[in-house]
Image (tube, helix red, strand yellow):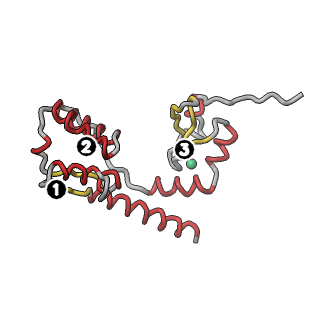
Amino acid sequence: MPKPQYTQHFRDSWLQDPHLKDWLQVIESTAGQVAKCKFCGTTLRSHYGDLKSHGISKKHLQNKKVIIMQPKIPFKPQPTGSRKKEEARLALFTAMHTSIRVVDHLGETLKRFDLRLENLMGIGTDNTSVMVGVNNGVYTKLKEEVPHLILERCLCHSLQLAVSAAAKEFCQEIWSS
Ligand SMILES: [Zn+2]
């Protein structure tokens, strides 16, 4: 007779467990609640033994060192006015659409905010191909409608990507030596 298989589910008590509480978080997925490591960004099997092993794994301890060494940036949530809500709606709209859809539906969205596409002076975006690609990027598509449009690539985003990649290489080099 085959051994019965038991499925272990995530337990909220693990979030208070002294071995896990510093890094464990729970996320909702289609398969239900899943364990995730804050330091490594990986999802883990909801099994206490696996989680404990992960907490003492070399990769986890290296990532923990990197995160603990990073200075904390003080962040206070700001009250959201109606203008901020409109800006957030536009940002979410952009994030949810591919470039062609963005341009197709942007006109409708702007109308809802009583704005006109031809008054658009410039756009600030990250450097993904969806936004700045020369063939089908949002900027290229928009420029067909608005020839005077200026593109401002997000320097902070580029800098953040470069610093993250450099820090990863640098830290791995230090800890592996
Ligand atoms: Zn981890």
Residue 103 — which label?
2
Q: Which residue is mark 1?
A: 150
Disc 1 or disc 3, which is closer to the eye? 1
Mark 3 Cβ inside 8 Å of ligand 1: yes
Q: Residue at x 32, y 61 (%)?
A: 159
Mark 1 touches mark 3? (CB < 8 Å): no
Question: Residue 158: x and y, percent?
Answer: 32, 60
Distance between mark 2 and mark 1 Cα atoms:
16 Å
Mark 2 touches mark 3? (CB < 8 Å): no
Question: Residue 134: x and y, percent?
Answer: 29, 59
Question: Residue 114: x and y, percent?
Answer: 12, 32
Q: Amino acid at mark 3?
A: Cys
| Of the image marks 1 and 3, the number of the one nearer the N terminus | 3
Along the line of sight, the residue nearer the viewer: 138 or 152:
138
Q: Amino acid at mark 2?
A: Val
Q: Which residue is mark 3?
A: 37
Name of the residue lying farthest toward the left: 119
At label 3, counting other C-alpha atoms closer than 10 Å, the crowd grade (few under 14, some 14-19, many 20 or more) is some
Q: In this picture, is 30 found above or below 75?
A: above
- SS state under label 1: strand
- SS state under label 2: helix
Disc 2 or disc 1, which is closer to the eye? 2
